[in-house]
Image (cartoon, coloured by chain):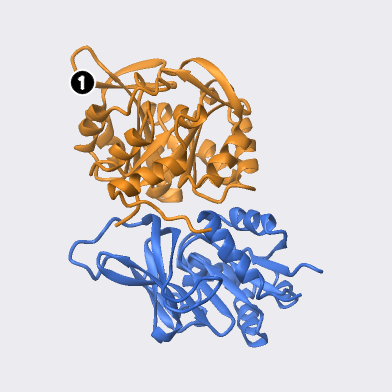
C-alpha cells in the first residue's frame, strides 16, 4: 500500500507565490524559491508549482524557478500552467520537473496527454481539472486557471483524459480555492467514482483535521494545500501528525 | 580536506540533472562524463538514469563505458547505481530480452506485477517503505526508511545475499537495495526522497575517498 501524500501547492506569478480567493484577487505571499524550500524542509511529500499566468505570457520564468528549486528541494516536483505542446513539457522536464500537469492545453487537444505520456511515461502526466459546481448540480470543467467555462462536465472529461494516458488526476474546487473553508468532499466523491489512477484533491483546506479527514477517505491519494500553508493556518508536520492519529498511512520522517 | 571526485555517467538516459543537483547540494563536484577514461580517475561513480533497458545498454556500449565500468569494479572504485542504472548491472532484462546487461550483479530484471494474481498499478510511482536487512549507509539492520520510487521493472538477483533492503508490494518482497563488492544499487531515487534520501547519498559519498 502506498502512502497518502501531503502536497504543498504553490501558485506562481513571475517569481512569487500568489494566492487569491477563488482564483481571483491575487495577493503576493513571497518568493517561490523560499516557500518551496520551507515546505520541503517541513517534510512535504511533493511540490506542485502552478504557473498561473503562463498561458498568457510564456514559460521561461517558471523553468528558471524549477531550476532554482531543484537545487535545494529533493522531492518530486509537479509543474503546471500553460502547457500547450510537447515542446512546452520538454522545457519543464529539462528544467527538473518530475511530472507536468495539463489543463487548458489538454482540453483543447486531448492527444497532448498521449504525446507526453509516450515520451515520459503516464506517471509523469497529470490532468488538472478546475471544477465548478454548475446550476444543474453537476461539476463543470474550467480552464485558464478557472477563468473560462468549457461547458464540459468533469464526469465526461476525466475518463477521456485517463484514456488518453493521464497517470494521475488533480482536481481543484474553484469555489473553495483560497477560502480555507474546507476541502470539497462532494467533488471528491463525484470524481472518485470515475478514476482508476491516483487522485489528488485541492482547494480550500481549512486545517490539519480537514486535511487528514479527507486523506482518510479511500478515494484520496493526496491533497494539495496552498493558502492554509501560506497563511500558516496549519503546517505539513501538523497534517502528518493528525494523519497518524487517525491511522492514515503517511510517510515517516526520520532525518 | 579535498572533496571526492564523483563521476556521473551520461549515457543518454533521462533525469540525470536532479542527481547532479543533489550531489552539488552535498558539496561534491560531480562531473558528468561520457568518456570511459573519465571514470577510472574518479573517486566514486554514479550510474543514474530513467528510461528503457535496451537503449541504456546501447548507450553504455556505444562509448565503451560498459568495459570501463567493469574495470572500475575490479579497481574497487565505489559505484552507486540508481533506478535504470541499477537494472543495467543485471545479466538481462525482460524489458529488452535481446540485450545483455553488464552482469556486474548476476540476476534478472523482471516486470513488476506479473507474478501476482491482481497486479498493482505499473509504473509503480510513489513513496514506499524500505526495510533494511543489514546495517548500511547510515541505517541499522531491521530499520525502515521511506523512499520515492518510479519503476515498472525490478531487479531479482541470483544470490539473495546481495539484498540489503526490500519493499513490500502486493504482499511480495521486492529487492530494492543491493550491495555487491564495491557496488551499491538502489531502485528508488535517493535524489527525490527528501532528507532521508540525501542522508543516504551522503553516507555513500563517505565511502569515496579522494
Mark 1: secondary structure:
loop
Which one of the lettered chains is coloured blue?
Answer: B
Q: Is residue B206 left or right of residue A204?
A: right
Q: Is residue A108 left or right of residue B172?
A: right
Question: What residue is at 32 percent from the left and 57 percent from the top?
Answer: B122
Question: What residue is at 67 percent from the left and 54 percent from the top?
Answer: B25
Instruction: Say how many tags the image has.
Output: 1
Chain identifier of the residue bearing label 1 in the image: A
Tag 1 residue: A138
At which x and y percent is residue A119?
Answer: 45, 49
Q: What hue represents chain A?
A: orange
Q: Is residue B139 left or right of residue A111?
A: right
B120 over A214 or under it: above or below: below
A229 over B196 or under it: above or below: above
At which x and y percent is residue B54?
Answer: 47, 68
The C terminus of chain B lies in quadrant = bottom right
Amino acid at each position: 500500500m502506498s502512502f497518502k501524500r501531503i502536497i504543498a501547492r504553490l501558485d506562481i506569478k513571475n517569481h512569487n507565490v500568489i494566492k487569491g480567493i477563488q482564483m481571483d484577487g491575487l495577493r503576493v505571499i513571497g518568493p517561490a524559491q523560499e516557500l518551496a524550500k520551507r515546505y520541503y524542509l517541513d517534510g512535504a511529500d511533493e511540490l506542485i508549482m502552478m504557473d498561473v499566468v503562463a498561458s498568457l505570457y510564456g514559460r521561461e520564468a517558471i523553468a528558471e524557478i524549477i531550476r532554482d528549486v531543484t537545487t535545494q528541494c529533493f522531492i518530486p516536483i509537479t509543474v503546471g500552467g500553460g502547457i500547450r505542446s510537447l515542446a512546452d513539457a520538454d522545457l519543464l522536464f529539462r528544467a527538473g520537473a518530475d511530472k507536468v500537469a495539463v489543463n487548458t492545453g489538454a482540453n483543447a487537444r486531448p492527444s497532448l496527454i498521449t504525446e507526453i505520456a509516450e515520451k515520459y511515461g503516464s506517471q509523469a502526466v497529470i490532468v488538472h481539472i478546475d471544477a465548478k459546481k454548475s446550476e444543474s448540480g453537476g461539476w463543470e470543467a474550467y480552464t485558464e486557471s478557472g477563468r473560462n467555462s468549457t461547458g464540459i462536465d468533469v464526469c465526461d472529461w476525466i475518463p477521456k483524459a485517463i484514456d488518453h494516458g493521464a497517470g494521475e488526476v488533480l482536481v481543484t474546487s474553484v469555489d473553495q480555492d483560497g477560502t480555507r473553508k474546507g476541502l470539497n468532499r462532494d467533488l471528491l466523491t463525484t470524481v472518485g467514482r470515475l478514476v482508476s489512477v491516483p487522485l489528488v484533491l485541492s482547494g480550500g483546506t481549512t486545517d490539519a483535521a480537514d486535511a487528514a479527514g479527507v486523506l482518510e477517505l479511500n478515494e484520496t491519494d493526496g491533497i494539495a494545500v496552498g493558502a492554509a500553508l501560506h497563511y500558516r493556518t496549519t503546517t505539513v508536520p501538523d497534517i502528518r501528525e493528525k494523519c497518524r492519529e487517525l491511522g492514515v498511512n503517511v510517510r515517516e520522517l526520520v532525518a | 580536506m579535498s572533496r571526492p571526485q564523483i563521476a556521473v555517467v551520461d549515457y543518454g538516459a533521462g533525469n540525470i540533472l536532479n542527481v547532479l543537483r543533489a550531489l552539488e547540494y552535498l558539496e561534491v563536484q560531480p562531473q558528468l562524463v561520457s568518456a570511459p577514461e573519465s571514470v577510472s580517475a574518479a573517486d566514486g561513480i554514479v550510474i543514474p538514469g530513467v528510461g528503457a533497458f535496451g537503449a541504456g545498454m546501447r548507450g553504455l556500449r556505444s562509448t565503451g563505458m560498459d568495459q570501463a565500468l567493469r574495470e572500475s569494479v575490479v579497481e574497487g572504485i565505489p559505484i552507486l547505481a540508481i533506478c535504470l542504472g541499477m537494472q543495467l548491472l543485471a545479466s538481462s532484462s525482460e524489458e529488452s530480452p535481446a540485450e545483455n546487461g553488464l552482469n556486474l550483479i548476476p540476476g534478472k530484471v523482471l516486470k513488476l506485477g506479473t507474478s501476482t494474481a491482481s497486479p498493482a498499478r505499473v509504473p509503480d510511482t510513489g513513496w514506499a517503505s524500505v526495510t533494511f536487512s543489514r546495517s548500511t549507509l547510515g541505517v541499522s539492520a531491521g530499520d525502515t526508511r521511506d523512499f520515492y520510487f518510479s519503476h515498472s521493472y525490478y531487479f531479482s538477483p541470483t544470490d539473495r545475499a546481495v539484498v540489503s533492503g526490500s519493499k513490500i508490494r502486493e504482499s511480495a518482497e521486492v529487492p530494492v537495495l543491493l550491495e555487491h563488492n564495491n557496488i551499491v544499487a538502489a531502485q528508488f531515487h535517493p535524489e527525490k526522497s527528501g532528507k532521508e534520501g540525501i542522508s543516504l547519498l551522503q553516507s555513500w559519498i563517505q565511502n569515496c575517498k579522494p
